[in-house]
């Protein structure tokens, strides 16, 4: 139980922290590339001048720097690397984004055919200070002397593959003929002036048909990207918390069942219901606090591993530092405590209110709800959940999709007990023929057995989560195939691209159309292991409950001649059967969940989920393996059973 709370807390913490970490890294990268410049001005027409006099000197501007850019290519041993050449007036550049040399020296005497390269480029290609490198500029080779090596920050940072190099302004102006002196002008707002205010001011002063004014850092887009990165982890956290409820509930059934004699003794000597309930809830509170507090350092370790993998996916392998938001810590610990208390409330409250006579005599029985009521509720809830996202307006698709997913899970939970009883009745005859009396008893033990149905529920939640996450991860291929279906494409570029880059590409000769596509990275497949681990913990708990409730019956069977081998066979048949039913339920529910996800995610594209049968078969195998492995614990317990004591107690 502590492990389930710990994992739930750590996953929820990761969900909050990963978005904040990614957003912080992107903001630092963007500000590193542009320095203190918050606004950029570019020319929309080749006839429009872009020089030192283009942007008027107004009070809203603190500093400005004209930047000239030119694409080049470096080759070595058949390998080609894109190099973006940047030149500027160093006095202006130092006010906005001063380059930092690796050896800490300043930039003086920088002129002629000299070049400053970032350390990541020089270490990759074995280039040293004073060496000569040759770059292809407009298909003409130009040789440069390496003036120095710069640290990989400031203007040398980039969001795409390749490298950025600094060259003297007069060299680039003399080498490449361009209608404008600069490619763009970077502007730093005056103190107290926001980027938006400066942008609006310049849009009023500069002709809109000749110049484009934009903010260098799109905070809204960075925040949206961060939410995109964290959303899958919140989905995993949802499944993890849902399973924690079942695990804690089943754990406290074990605790209360094991302590019934003690509870009976307390009650018989005058302890009130409130006292018994308070003691057990206090224990639950300790579990919640301990799991929540321990989950934070575990979550930090997991977060660093994930961010390391995400950093490798960025250009040049940028390291993303972990950002630990205090609200994320507080919410994760609070969620652990709340889930622990609420999940344990029902078994604790029930144990506290049991009549003393029933506790002492061991005649405690659980009340059952009518099957017709639960099946009817499940059918209605499932039907509403399937129809809701299909009839919801586009603006309400996301909340409708969330309600639909919750409804499908709730409907399956209500339906599983009746479905298990139905299957168990059919398996009695089949197992009796195939496995003999042990198989028939195993199937019969599954009927009206809440512990078995809880095992199946845990399996279906965990396996359906893994299937859904895997299918959504494979969505990228189908999405791109649908977008490009029938398109006549001559090239494809991969990387981070802003509006200015797209505008420049559209202006290239021979480019007729540019289609920017945003792709979701699939980085969460491995996180399904946490969910399966939690499912395994819950299954072991439920199997222990099942054993504790049946240990007297098992003792009677053994006294009548049931061997240990037959008992092992019977328990394994139960475990494998529960795994098969759980896998079947997971496949059915996950298929409907995937349909809902695709309806919500792609209302404007004509694609269908590309479902791989191997995913579903693997899910079935996982269900069988997990339950079969979990059966080992009660099997070992039954081998240690003292037969005379159990029969005597009976």
Image (cartoon, rainbow, N blue to C red):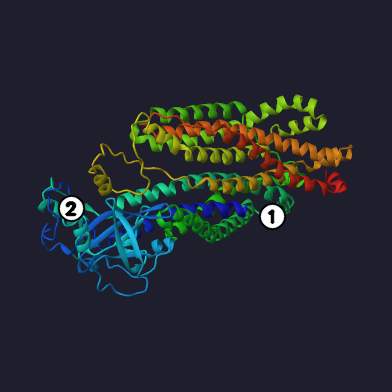
Indicate the quadrant where residue 183 lies. bottom left
The residue under the point 39% across, 48% down is 227
Task: Point out the frontmost of discs 2 and 1.
Answer: 2
Mark 2: few, some, or many residues within 10 Å (few <14, many ≥20)? some
Mark 1: few, some, or many residues within 10 Å (few <14, many ≥20)? few
Is 537 drawn above or below residue 484 in the view shown?
Answer: below
Q: Circle 2 is placed at which residue position?
A: 178
The residue under the point 42% across, 52% down is 78
Q: Circle 1 is placed at which residue position?
A: 270
Indicate the quadrant where residue 397 lies. top left
Sequence-first disc among 2 and 1: 2
Q: In front here: 268 or 149? A: 149
Give coordinates of residue 381: x percent, y percent. 50, 30
Q: In front here: 96 or 50? A: 50
Is 113 drawn above or below residue 513 in the view shown?
Answer: below
Residues under numbered marks 2 and 1 in contact, where contact means CB atoms less than 8 Å apart: no
């Amino acid at each position: 139980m502590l492990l389930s709370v710990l994992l739930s807390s750590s996953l929820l913490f990761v969900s909050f922290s990963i978005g904040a970490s990614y957003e912080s890294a992107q903001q630092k990268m963007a500000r590193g590339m542009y320095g203190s410049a918050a606004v950029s001005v570019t020319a929309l027409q080749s006839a429009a001048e872009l020089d030192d006099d283009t942007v008027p000197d107004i009070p809203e501007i603190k500093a400005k720097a004209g930047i000239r850019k030119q694409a080049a290519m470096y080759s070595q041993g058949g390998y080609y690397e894109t190099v973006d050449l940047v030149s500027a007036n160093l006095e202006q550049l130092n006010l906005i984004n001063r380059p930092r040399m690796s050896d800490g020296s300043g930039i003086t005497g920088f002129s002629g055919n000299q070049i400053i390269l970032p350390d990541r480029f020089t270490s990759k290609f074995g280039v040293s200070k004073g060496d000569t490198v040759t770059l292809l500029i407009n298909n003409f080779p130009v040789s440069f002397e390496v003036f120095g090596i710069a640290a990989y920050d400031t203007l040398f940072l980039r969001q795409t593959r390749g490298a950025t190099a600094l060259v003297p302004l007069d060299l680039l102006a003399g080498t490449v003929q361009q209608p404008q002196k600069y490619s763009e002008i970077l502007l730093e707002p005056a103190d107290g002036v926001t980027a938006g205010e400066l942008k609006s001011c310049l849009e009023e002063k500069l002709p809109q048909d000749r110049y484009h004014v934009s903010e260098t850092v799109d905070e809204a887009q960075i925040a949206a990207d961060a939410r995109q990165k964290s959303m899958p982890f919140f989905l995993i956290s949802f499944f993890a918390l849902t399973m924690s409820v079942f695990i804690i509930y089943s754990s406290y059934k074990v605790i209360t069942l094991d302590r019934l004699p003690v509870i009976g003794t307390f009650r018989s000597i005058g302890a009130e219901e409130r006292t018994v309930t308070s003691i057990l809830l206090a224990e639950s509170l300790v579990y919640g606090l301990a799991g929540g507090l321990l989950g934070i350092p575990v979550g930090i370790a997991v977060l660093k591993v994930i961010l390391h993998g995400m950093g490798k996916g960025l250009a040049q392998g940028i390291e993303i530092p972990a950002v630990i938001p205090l609200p994320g810590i507080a919410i994760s610990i609070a969620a652990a405590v709340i889930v622990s208390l609420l999940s344990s409330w029902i078994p604790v409250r029930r144990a506290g209110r049991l009549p003393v006579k029933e506790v002492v005599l061991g005649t405690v029985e659980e009340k059952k709800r009518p099957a017709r009521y639960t099946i009817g509720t499940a059918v209605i809830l499932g039907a509403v959940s399937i129809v809701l996202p299909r009839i919801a307006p586009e603006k309400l698709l996301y909340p409708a999709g969330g309600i639909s997913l919750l409804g499908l899970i709730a409907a399956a939970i209500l339906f599983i007990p009746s479905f298990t009883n139905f299957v168990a009745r059919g398996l009695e005859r089949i197992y009796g023929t195939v496995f003999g009396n042990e198989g028939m008893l195993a199937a019969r033990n599954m009927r009206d057995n809440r512990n078995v149905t809880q095992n199946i529920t845990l399996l279906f939640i965990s396996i359906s989560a893994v299937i859904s996450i895997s299918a959504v991860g494979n969505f990228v291929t189908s999405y791109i195939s649908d977008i490009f279906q029938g398109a006549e494409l001559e090239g494809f570029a991969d990387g981070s691209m802003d509006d200015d880059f797209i505008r420049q590409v559209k202006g290239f000769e021979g480019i007729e159309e540019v289609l920017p596509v945003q792709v979701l990275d699939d980085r969460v497949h491995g996180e399904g292991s946490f969910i399966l681990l939690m499912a395994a913990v819950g299954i072991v708990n439920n199997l222990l409950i099942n054993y504790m409730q049946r240990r007297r019956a098992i003792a009677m069977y053994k006294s009548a001649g049931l061997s240990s081998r037959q008992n092992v066979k019977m328990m394994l048949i139960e475990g494998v059967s529960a795994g098969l039913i759980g896998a079947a339920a997971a496949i059915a529910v996950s298929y409907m969940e995937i349909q809902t996800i695709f309806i919500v995610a792609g209302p404007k594209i004509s694609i269908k989920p590309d479902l791989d049968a191997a995913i579903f078969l693997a899910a079935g195998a996982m269900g069988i393996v997990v339950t079969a492995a979990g059966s080992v614990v009660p099997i070992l317990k039954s081998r240690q059973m003292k037969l005379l004591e159990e029969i005597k107690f009976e």
